[in-house]
Image (cartoon, rainbow, N blue to C red):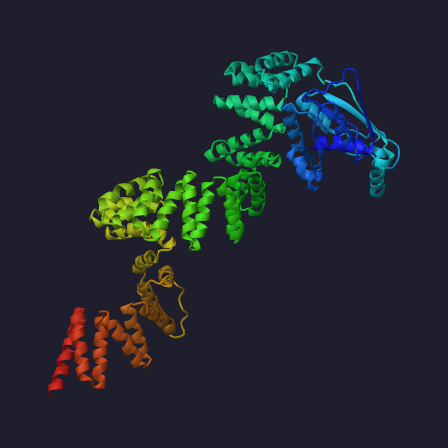
Amino acid sequence: MLSRLAHALVPAFGRLSVTADRDAELRPGSVIAPNHTSLADPAVVLAALRRLGVQPVVMAAAGLWAVPLLGRALAREGHIPVHRGDRRAARALDLAEEALGRGRSVLIYPEGGIHAYGEGAETAPGPFRSGLSRLVERTGAPVVPVGQAGARRVMSGGPAGQLAGVLSAPFRRPALHVHVGAPLAPAGDRAAANNLGVLLHQRGYPDEAAGWWRVAAVAGSAAAAHALGRHHRERGDEPAAEYWLRQSAEQGHALGAYALADLMDHRGDAGAERWLRVAAEQGHREAAYRLARALERRADAGTGEAGAEADTAEQWYRQAAARGHRRAALHLGAILEKRGEVKEAGRWYLTAAKEGESRAACALGFLLRDAGDEESAAVWWLRAAQDGDGNAANALGALHAARGEYQTAERWYRAATDAGDVNGAYNLGLLSAAQGRTAQAEQWYRRAAYAGHREAANALAILLLQAGDPHGAEPWFSKAAEAGSVDAAFNLGILHAGRGDDRTALGWYERAAAAGHTEAALQVGMARLRDGDEREAERHLRCAAGGGSAEAAFRLATVLDARQPPPEPHTLGRPRAPKTECEEWYERAAEQGHRRAQVRVGMLAAARGDVAEAARWYREAAEAGSRNGAFNLGLLLARDGNEREAALWWSRAARAGHGRAALRLALLAARRGELAEGRRWCVRAVELGPAEVAERAARLGEALRQELTA
């Protein structure tokens, strides 16, 4: 389109003439190098080249891609943006090399830009930049020099002069001239032979192409040796392929080094990494990516100097990502995210996601969700899920499930399952179970469990156990536990304990506890206490208490409390002793709502003389249903003279089965002269015990009976 447009418009602005050297030839895969004197000369040169039957790929300033319509046309036709002074500048040479390899001609301005903007006559050429020589050195492509004159008569000078020139050109019709020179083959005939091979290969004559590549390769063409090596590999002749690829690689040809590394890696040859490094050092992005992957795998496996190799891997990922390798950008983002550099990780994920890497879009979604931006996260998850990413589909399902949009959630979980993500089936099971659809839940759990999902196997076993099928549940618990499910190991412990098989139960509890399961550690600790192994019990109770188990914290405190010397009575004026470790564990359990711990903390506070603190903990325990807490709170209230409220708490404790509370109520009623009420509480105290309480209550009851009958 760009060449056609230039061909149509240029004659309207001037009289174009085109000449060429006698041996001028614009072969496919040529580098076309015109002089650059005006903003109008690209159109003039393109119009002239189209007359000669050539429509090249143009390397132009990246700013043109921001121009409406023009930018879209440039991108659609595969023209190459040049980001000057940017880390993406090297990417332009990569794209130009790929275009030449496909047989396209590439137009590059050796000067890099317009050397002089002054008005008037033609200007002398400016100094050449390195891009042309680097491109030719890498590809061996012939260079076609092109000279143009007259474009400055259309556009030159400042903005006003340029506008005036364009508007007046159709009336002035200045002379425009383009001259095409003979190709300059950097390596003489070998470059021509290589280019002929490329042309024949493109036209469907691979064997004839191989013949010319051989001629060029024997003459020393690294590009031809690379092409010939690939030809032999496609034919299955690996020894010949390795020979020619090695010839290419040893001459410093990046594509040859990469192809040789790929061949050696396919065979499992340890020397592949050396050639990957050679290619990567010459700017080959895929080589840089694969080298980084190899180094990262070695670092993860713990072989070699893991830290140094991880750092080197990151550097190669960075180089490949900077050259537009989307998977390298994904891995670099993952490394940075793991290190806590979330902002930079997000930038690389965004780069990869924009290039179509669905895993990067998914990872970016999780970063945004963690930052609290669920709406933006959903946009990226949707994009990734539509590209077939099962993890993103699961994330969308979870998002909609949390909002109560169960039908939409189910649709995305099904999409994840269809994409091959076994978590989708597991999540469908969870969703069905939450909605009470047990049969469907079992179906989805089975599907995920058969695919090796250990938590699905555990969930299926729980479902079967709840349905009264412990024998059907046990194999699934075992399968999940053997696959590493800590919850399944704990559940097996519960299953065997319920059958009275304490030995087997303890084995599974220990396995789960070793993997960090808090409740399993508590069960092991309690079992060791029953066996009298206090030291081992303490170790497991500490693990469970540290993991947040209130019961473990309480039991650990009781173990430590039993070792404490009897407390000295509190006396006024003596400084309060610091809290012991057992008190700290009692308090931790109490703060988590453990009623017995709350009562014990209250008792310790009372022993220190801190009545207000004791009352607070007794009240918390009593309100949570602790009869001991209610009884002790009643004692404190009665001591302060508040017998009415004390009686209320003692009544609550007595109704819950506390014999001493019933006896206190009996004594209180007797003092008030409520003999029948007192005798009723005495009967209750005798029923509840313990023995000493029952004995005292019986004597008091007999005395009250005699009073009543007197």
In the figure, residue 165 lies in which quadrant? Answer: top right
Residue 644: image location, x then y, percent: 29, 81
Which one is in front, 107 or 697?
A: 107
In the figure, residue 345 lies in which quadrant? Answer: top right
The residue that appears at 38% across and 75% down in the rendered structure is 572
The residue that appears at 24% across and 43% down in the rendered structure is 472
Residue 271 visible, this angle: no
Q: Is residue 580 left or right of residue 196?
A: left
Q: Give the answer, above or below, for where 15 lies relative to 365.
A: above
Q: Is residue 539 left or right of residue 151?
A: left
Which one is in front, 254 or 402?
A: 402
Residue 475: image location, x then y, percent: 26, 41
In the figure, residue 478 lies in which quadrant? Answer: top left
Residue 574: image location, x then y, percent: 40, 72
Residue 456 visible, this angle: yes
Which one is in front, 589 or 218?
A: 218
Which one is in front, 208 or 242?
A: 208
The residue furthest right is 120
User: Where is the C terminus found, in terms of image quarters?
Assistant: bottom left
The residue that appears at 71% across and 24% down in the rendered structure is 54
User: Where is the N terminus found, in terms of image quarters?
Assistant: top right
Q: How many marks?
A: 0
Residue 551: image location, x then y, percent: 32, 58
Q: Give the answer, above or below, for where 378 lies relative to 235.
A: below
